[in-house]
């Protein structure tokens, strides 16, 4: 999620433009600084040799959260399969948390700390293919999130009556801000237990299903939650407070899905009104993407002390029980106020991000571009194709073109916040290019089926979409994901003769384009970087326009270039 980091940049950019003199203003776009990455970024973002030789099978996380002193204490049993020659084992746990001991086969192991990473010396036999377990005991006062969900850490909040309300947000920063884990998107456990111990006046809600509540020490209870499916570690979240609960079921493509709604006790009425969007959301997304990915673990929507996050099977909600994005319409079209942005966007991540997960955050566009695009598909499901398209086009005004959408691999570095609006508009444009909605839908559903509960690369997604739409989409992806340029359709119209080409594009860019020639008639052109000419069945000059659903710029030129004469003959 963390959408607003992009919005924040929008605000900063607006300020810069308003300033009479400023570096950014005087020079146009400020010169992009080459990113500087640290050793710690590599430890966090790379598949280091100390991560590569073992594959997580199961996390058995037990943690006590103490609101009295903002500390956590517990242990994580990490079950793993040995996939290569063993060496030290990298386990991540962020400063200021401390590991107390690491135990395997009843023996304490030694380790060395390097910032937020621990390198544990395993001494027992690690036969390739064998399944082993190591237990990591830890404690400390974790970093507190200052501005969740846009930064990460523990959230020690208060409910409207001043009661204790605790949660976490850690996408980007990493789950190792509060529990020891292999902190990469590239490796998910097949299942996970999360046993949360909290003061017994509070409830502790987690991901997946509740297995039981047991009395721990005097005054404490342990709530045992279990997720039966692979889960991103940033999706693991506790919600601790005084919650109401009501349930429902949804009969969908995967059978009967349990719906579990958890507003704060103060907000039951508001939630019953607002969260009735869940069922049409599920119906729409199942239509476009295929079955909700977690029938076994259920769907849960739960109020959180921050705006929202796609926590798997326990989606965090903090949008104030009103439509739009904190009550505003990101698209400026009015359509953005017809749905609750957090319910729709974060739930879309159950398909895009949680079920299908990218190995490296540099490819985070796969999560956010499809989630953004899902908002327009939901609008389409509710109000028709034109409404969905208008919403999607409306979000273009938030595109910054500040830097490429694809980030830097291996250093936990996301690309531009344009992964939301520009990425969504790229997908909307591709749908026009494919020009066959049943093929388009089958491709989205196929992606979900092929990569359900799996880790992918951005490249795999691109190749899948080209293969299954039957359209070579590679250059379109390259243009929108790796450059900050928007394609310009340059043309000259002489009577009914159209001369045209693509400008401002990557080499070999050849995206087909639909142009209107009469009120109810359009033709498909195949522009390239070279000028070419064609004769249009143009009813009148004023009817000529480029289909606005393509995210391109259009420029009428007087001089169509010397090459045009050559290609037109
Ligand atoms: Zn998102």
Image (cartoon, rainbow, N blue to C red):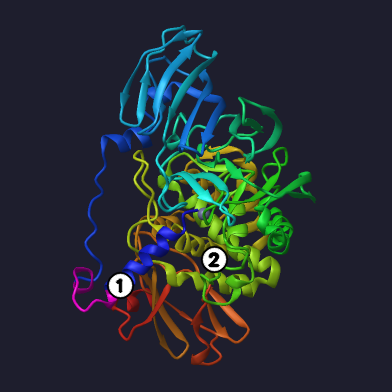
Image quadrant where residue 392 sits = bottom right
**Can you tell which mark lies on residue 325?**
2
Look at the image and say whether residue 18 sits in the magenta stretch: yes
From the Cβ of disc 2, is ligand 1 less than 8 Å away? no
Rendered view: 405 above or below 102: below
Rendered view: 108 above or below 303: above
**Can you tell which mark lies on residue 70?**
none
Magenta segment's dominant SS is: helix
How many residues crowd around disc 1 within 10 Å: few (fewer than 14), some, or many (20 or more)? few
Judging depth in this view, the residue of 480 and 407 nearest the camera is 407
Range of the magenta residues?
Answer: 17-26
Tell me the residue at 44%/82% (across/down): 498
How many residues crowd around disc 2 within 10 Å: few (fewer than 14), some, or many (20 or more)? many
Q: Is residue 206 left or right of residue 425?
A: right
Tell me the residue at 61%/25% (across/down): 217
Going by the picture, which residue comes out furthest to the front?
Answer: 218
Q: Could you say where residue 128 lies in the image, as x and y percent from the top left? A: 49, 13
Rendered view: 333 above or below 291: below
Is residue 525 visible in this depiction of the protein?
no
Q: Mark 1 points at which residue?
A: 15
């Amino acid at each position: 999620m963390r959408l607003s980091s992009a919005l924040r940049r929008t605000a900063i950019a607006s300020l810069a433009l308003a300033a009479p003199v400023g570096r950014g203003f005087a020079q146009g776009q400020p010169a992009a600084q080459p990113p500087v990455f640290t050793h710690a970024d590599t430890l966090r973002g790379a598949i280091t040799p100390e991560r590569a030789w073992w594959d997580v099978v199961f996390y058995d996380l037990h943690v006590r959260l103490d609101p009295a002193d903002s500390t956590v204490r517990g242990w994580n049993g990490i079950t793993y399969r040995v996939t290569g020659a063993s060496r030290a084992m990298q386990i991540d746990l962020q400063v200021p948390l401390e590991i107390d001991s690491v135990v395997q086969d009843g023996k304490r192991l030694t380790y060395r700390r390097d910032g937020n990473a621990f390198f544990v010396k395993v001494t027992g036999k690690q036969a390739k293919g064998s399944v082993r377990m190591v237990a990591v005991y830890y404690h400390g006062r974790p970093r507190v999130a200052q501005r969740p969900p846009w930064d990460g850490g523990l959230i020690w909040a208060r409910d409207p009556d001043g009661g204790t309300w605790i949660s976490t947000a850690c996408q980007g920063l990493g789950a190792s801000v509060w529990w020891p884990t292999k902190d990469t998107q590239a490796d998910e456990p097949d299942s996970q237990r999360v046993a949360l111990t909290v003061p017994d006046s509070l409830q502790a809600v987690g991901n997946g299903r509740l297995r039981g509540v047991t009395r721990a020490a005097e005054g404490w209870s342990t709530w045992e939650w279990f997720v039966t499916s692979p889960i991103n570690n940033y999706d693991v979240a506790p919600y601790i407070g005084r919650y109401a609960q009501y349930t429902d079921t949804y009969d969908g493509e995967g059978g009967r899905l349990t719906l579990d709604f958890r507003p704060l006790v103060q907000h039951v009425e508001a939630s019953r009104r607002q969260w009735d969007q869940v069922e049409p959301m599920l119906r729409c997304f199942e239509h476009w993407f295929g079955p909700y990915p977690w029938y076994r673990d259920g769907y849960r929507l739960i109020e959180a002390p921050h705006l929202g996050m796609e926590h798997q099977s326990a989606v965090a909600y903090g949008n104030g029980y009103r439509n739009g994005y904190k009550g505003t319409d990101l698209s400026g079209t009015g359509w953005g106020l017809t749905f609750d942005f957090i319910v729709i966007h974060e739930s879309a991540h159950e398909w895009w991000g949680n079920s299908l997960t990218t190995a490296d955050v540099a490819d985070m566009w796969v999560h956010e571009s499809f989630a953004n695009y899902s908002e327009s598909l939901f609008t389409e499901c509710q109000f028709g194709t034109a409404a969905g398209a208008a919403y999607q086009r409306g979000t273009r005004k938030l595109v910054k073109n500040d830097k490429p959408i694809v980030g830097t691999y291996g250093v936990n570095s996301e690309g531009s916040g344009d992964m939301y609006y520009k990425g969504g508009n790229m997908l909307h444009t591709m749908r026009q290019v494919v020009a066959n909605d049943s093929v388009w839908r089958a491709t989205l559903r196929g992606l979900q089926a092929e990569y359900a509960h799996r880790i992918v690369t951005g490249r795999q997604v691109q190749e899948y979409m080209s293969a299954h739409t039957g359209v070579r989409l590679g250059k379109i992806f390259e243009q929108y994901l790796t450059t900050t340029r928007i394609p310009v359709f340059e043309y000259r119209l002489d009577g009914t003769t159209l001369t045209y080409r693509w400008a401002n594009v990557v080499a070999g860019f050849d995206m087909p384009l639909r142009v209107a020639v009469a009120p109810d008639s359009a033709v498909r052109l195949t522009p390239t970087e070279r000028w070419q000419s064609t004769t249009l069945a143009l009813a009148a000059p004023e009817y000529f326009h480029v289909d606005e659903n393509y995210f391109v710029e259009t420029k009428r030129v007087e001089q169509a270039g010397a090459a045009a004469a050559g290609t037109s003959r």
